[in-house]
Amino acid sequence: MVNDPTHVLIVEDDEVARTKLVGYLESAGHRVSEAVDGQELRQIMTGDPVDLVLLDINLPGEDGLDLTRYIRARHDVGIILVTGRTDDVDRILGLEIGADDYVTKPFNPRELLARVKTLLRRTRTRAQSFSETKMFEGWHFDTRTRRLVSPGGDKVALTRAEFELLNALVARPGTVLTRERLLQSIAHRSWDPSDRTVDVLVRRLRQKLEADPKSPEIIITAHGEGYLFAAEVSAR
């Protein structure tokens, strides 16, 4: 059981599926709220702080992608998309616009709970750790607060998944990290050749870090292997 219950919001219009999700999460000790659409999601998140949103992509009206954009623009919470096996394009787009992870229907309850636990643990670990600022190419990266500041002094927002990936890369500059190793760092699951999560997140980070994302100089592709953080890193 969770000593300090975290608040998970399930957004799912199918009553049977929603009831099962509620049961899984409550049995693990989480406090759970339910919503069937965007209107109910807004009402809950306005009145009660949420730690993580479990969001079905295929909702009537505003779908899960629309709601991911809404949440990410206003709230710093974990977002796990619930997708169908045929939702590859939507899943990738969901990661592009700020979702942290996804689980595919039909899912194994243990896998779902592991994803939830991993994302919540990463959040708490950051909050409890001491502040360390790492510097590279004029950038300042605070690994406790997830604060990234550009050479010009502008704060650059990072999603949880972007933070975890950048943190993994910065921790091992000059070392080629495989996609499998990076995926383990950000999602604690095994990589397979069809999984584009790491590539999507690298593309998002390049858009934020690189002067020319099409000719990256900080996060370099090691063809056939993975990615390398090419900048020199110092810490204080």
Image (cartoon, helix red, strand yellow):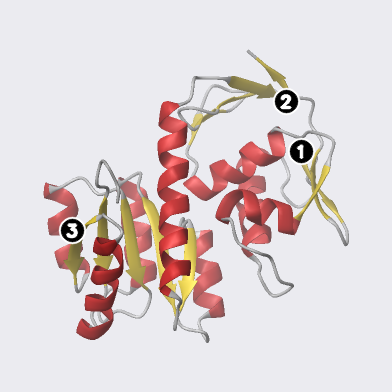
Q: Residues within 10 Å of mark 2 (few under 14, many from 20)?
A: few
Q: Residue at x 71, y 40 (%)?
A: 169
Gap between marks 2 and 3 measured at Cα: 40 Å
Q: Which residue is mark 1?
A: 218
Is residue 177 or residue 27 the one in the foreground? 27
In primary-sequence order, the first of circles 2 and 3 is: 3
**On screen, residue 18 above or below 69:** below
Q: How many tags in the picture? A: 3
Q: Secondary structure at mark 2?
A: loop
Is residue 75 or residue 236 the one in the foreground? 236
Residue 174, quarter of picture: top right
Q: Secondary structure at mark 1?
A: loop
**Residue 173: image x %, image y %?**
79, 33
**On screen, residue 1 above or below 147:** below
Q: Which residue is mark 3?
A: 42
Q: Which residue is mark 2?
A: 137
Asked if disc 2 and disc 1 are in contact, CB closer than 8 Å, the reply is: yes
Residue type for callout 2: Glu
Asked if disc 2 and disc 3 are in contact, CB closer than 8 Å, the reply is: no
Q: Residue at x 28, y 81 (%)?
A: 17
Q: Secondary structure at mark 3?
A: helix
**Residue 68: image x %, image y %?**
37, 61
**Relative to residue 14, is residue 156 drawn left or right?**
right
In primary-sequence order, the first of circles 2 and 1 is: 2
**On screen, residue 69 above or below 235:** below
Callout in the foreground (2, 3)? 3
Gap between marks 2 and 1 measured at Cα: 8 Å
**Residue 141: image x %, image y %?**
58, 27
Q: Residue furthest front?
A: 1
Gap between marks 3 and 1 measured at Cα: 38 Å
Asked if disc 3 and disc 1 are in contact, CB closer than 8 Å, the reply is: no
